[in-house]
Image (spheres, grey):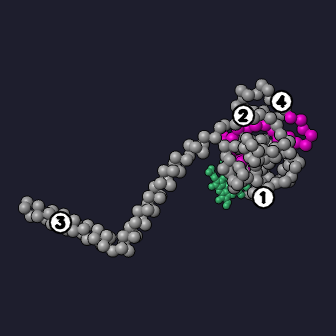
Amino acid sequence: MENTVDADATAAQAESSYLAGVLREIFYSPMNLALVSIICFLVYKIIRDRTESIRDVPQAQAEPELPKLRRDFTVKELRHYDGNQPDGRVLVAVNGSVYDVTKGKRFYGPGGPYATFAGRDASRNLATFSVVANENENYDDLSDLGAMEMDTVRDWEMQFKEKYEYVGKLLRNGEQPNTYENDSDKDDETAADNDKEE
Ligand code: HEM
C-alpha cells in the first residue's frame, strides 16, 4: 500500500518537474518565447475571425425579400434581371420557364460563378456544361440538342423548380404574354405545369 503511495508521489513529482522544465525552456529562450507569442497571436486571430464570420451570417441573410413576381418574359425583357439593377432581382430561364433565383445570388449574382446565366435562358449552357454568356436575343427552341442533352436540361429544370420560385414562361418569338391576376394562390409547381400545357 505504502509502495503505491510512494510511486504516485514520485510520478507526480516527475510530471511537475517535467512541466517546469518545458516552461523554463520556453521562457528562458528568446527564440522560443517569440514562437509561442506568434502561435498565441495566430490562434487568437483564427478564433476572432471565426466568431466574426458567424456573427456576419445573419446580417448577410437579412436582405429584404422582394415581392413575388408573376409574369411572362421575352428573351429581351429577361435580360434586364441580371442582378445589376437597383432591386438586385435575378431571373434565369430553363427549358422555357423563368425562375426567380435571387436567393441564389451567390451563384448567379454579379461576380458569381454562374453570373453569365443571370437574365438569360441558361438551357443551352446547362445542356452543354458551358458558362460562356449566351448572347442570342431570340427564343432558343433547343431543337438541335440531342436526347441526352435534353435530359440534362430537364434534370436542371427539376432542380430549379424545387429550389426557386417560378415566375412565368419564356415567350417564343411573337408569342403573347399571359395575365396572371387570379393566379397568386397557385403553388409554383402547379403554375409551372399549367403554363407548360398552354
Ligand atoms: C469544375 C467544374 C465545376 C465545379 C467544381 C462546380 C462546383 C459547384 C458547386 C460546389 C456548387 C455549389 C453547390 C451548392 O452549394 O449547393 C455548384 C453549383 C452550381 N453549378 Fe457548378 N461546378 C462546376 C461546373 C459547372 C458547370 C459547367 C455548370 C453548368 C454549365 C455548373 C452549373 C452549376 C449551377 C447552375 C449551380 C447552382 C445550382 C443552384 O442554383 O443551387 N457548374 N457548382
Looking at the rendering, the quadrant in which ligand 1 lies is bottom right
- 135 and 186: which is toward the camera: 135
Q: Are marks 4 and 3 in contact (CB under 8 Å)?
A: no
What residue occupies the far left of the structure in this picture? Answer: 2
Instruction: Name which residue lies at 65% across and 37% down.
Output: 64
Q: Which mark is residue 132?
A: 1
Q: Which mark is residue 13?
A: 3
Q: Residues within 10 Å of mark 1 (few under 14, many from 20)?
A: few
Name the amino acid, label 3. Gln
Name the amino acid, label 4. Thr
- 169 and 81: which is toward the camera: 81
Q: Are marks 4 and 1 in contact (CB under 8 Å)?
A: no
Instruction: Name which residue lies at 69% across and 41% down.
Output: 164
Q: Which mark is residue 68?
A: 2
Q: Are marks 2 and 3 in contact (CB under 8 Å)?
A: no
Q: Residues within 10 Å of mark 2 (few under 14, many from 20)?
A: few
Q: Report whether 168 appears left or right of 173.
A: left
Q: Which mark is residue 49?
A: none
Q: Would you name the residue on which mark 4 appears?
A: 179
For marks 4 and 1, give the CA distance: 33 Å
